[in-house]
Amino acid sequence: RKNHEREKARLIRQVTERRAEVREKIIDYLRGHPCVDCGEDDIVVLEFDHIGDKVADISVYAGGGRSWERVRAEIDKCEVRCANCHRRKTRERSAGRDRLSLPADRPSRVSRLPVQLSLDATLGVRTCRVCSKTKPLIEFPYRSLRRQTRQWICLLCQREYTNDWYRRNSNRQIAKAKVRNRRARADLRIQVRDYLLCHPCVDCGESDPDVLDFDHLRDKTANVSTLMQSPVSWKAVTDEIAKCEIRCANCHRRRTASSGNYYRTRSSR
């Protein structure tokens, strides 16, 4: 037991020392390799952009106690780009993928005033024409809320019919749901992009929506990008956006690194 604890402590110390060594060498490497596209040399915003066969992110190797030789072998498959240029390059490579054509004349939803239910319309009984059972009127779904009229098939029979119909048509319904979800996500992407086109980076003024981020200031519920994939309502997205400032990837990285006291920030001073 004593030897086990000693060996465990030795391994932890070894990994910690190797991690620190690798981080210092990564910093030295980045100091000599500015962004290949724009020349940005701030190591806080520089990233390794894989152009060869990727095994793992450099950050994963650096934090995992890998040897410098192994990390350097992975670095050799990369070009160094700042976060903004990396974002643009990734966008360029993925151009044309995941695009969804939306009809130009999609009808907008019409908001309706709430209907005041009548107490008289909920009283009484009715006999279901399927199961022939007499049940309270409230167990029969409304046919028309405006007219306060109800159907002649009870809720239980309708539910059984609906479940049976879905079992017979599930594949078609799932396919239709996927199309609706893709369409809803595409709508959200368009609306978010339109928002970003009107809101440049609050720090440097960068206006390219491809490199702009939502930087949360308070009460974060989820990343805006995560909400866009849900999909959720546009109101839910704007409620989350209201908690954010817009920053480009570079400025976002600098602010996050500074507030988090990252090792690259300490080394760049």
Image: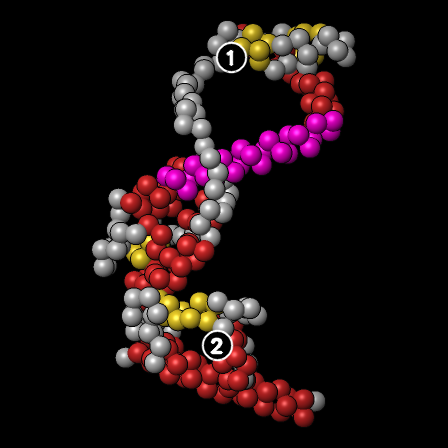
Q: Earlier in the sequence, mark 2 or mark 1?
A: 2
**On the rendered image, what quadrant is the C terminus found in?**
bottom left
Front: mark 2 or 1: 2
Q: Which residue is mark 2?
A: 76
Q: Is residue 25 above or below residue 101?
A: below
Residue 138: image x %, image y %?
61, 15
Residue 144 visible, this angle: yes
SS at badge 2: loop
SS at badge 1: loop
Residue 257 visible, this angle: no
Q: Is residue 62 above or below residue 230?
A: below
Question: Where, by quadrant of the figure, is residue 32 drawn?
Answer: bottom left
Which residue is depicted at the point 56% across and 7% down?
149
The magenta-colored residue range is: 167-191
Amino acid type of disc 1? Leu
Mark identifier at residue 114: none
Q: Nearer the viewer, residue 236 or 141?
A: 236
Which residue is depicted at the point 45% across and 14% down?
116
**On the rendered image, what quadrant is the N terminus found in?**
bottom right
Could you give the CA–CA distance between mark 2 and mark 1, rounded to whole angstroms? 68 Å
- Does the magenta stretch mainly form a helix, a strand or a loop? helix
Residue 220: image x %, image y %?
40, 52
Residue 245: image x %, image y %?
29, 52
Mark identifier at residue 145: 1
Residue 201: image x %, image y %?
26, 54
Mark 1 is surrounded, within 10 Å at the Cα level, by few (under 14), some (14 to 19) or many (20 or more) other residues, namely: some
Amino acid type of disc 2? Asp
Question: Where, by quadrant of the figure, is residue 194 drawn?
Answer: top left
| Magenta stretch: includes residue 184 | yes
Horizontal relation, residue 155 to residue 44: left or right: right
Which residue is depicted at the point 48% across and 77% down?
76
Q: Nearer the viewer, residue 219 or 35?
A: 35
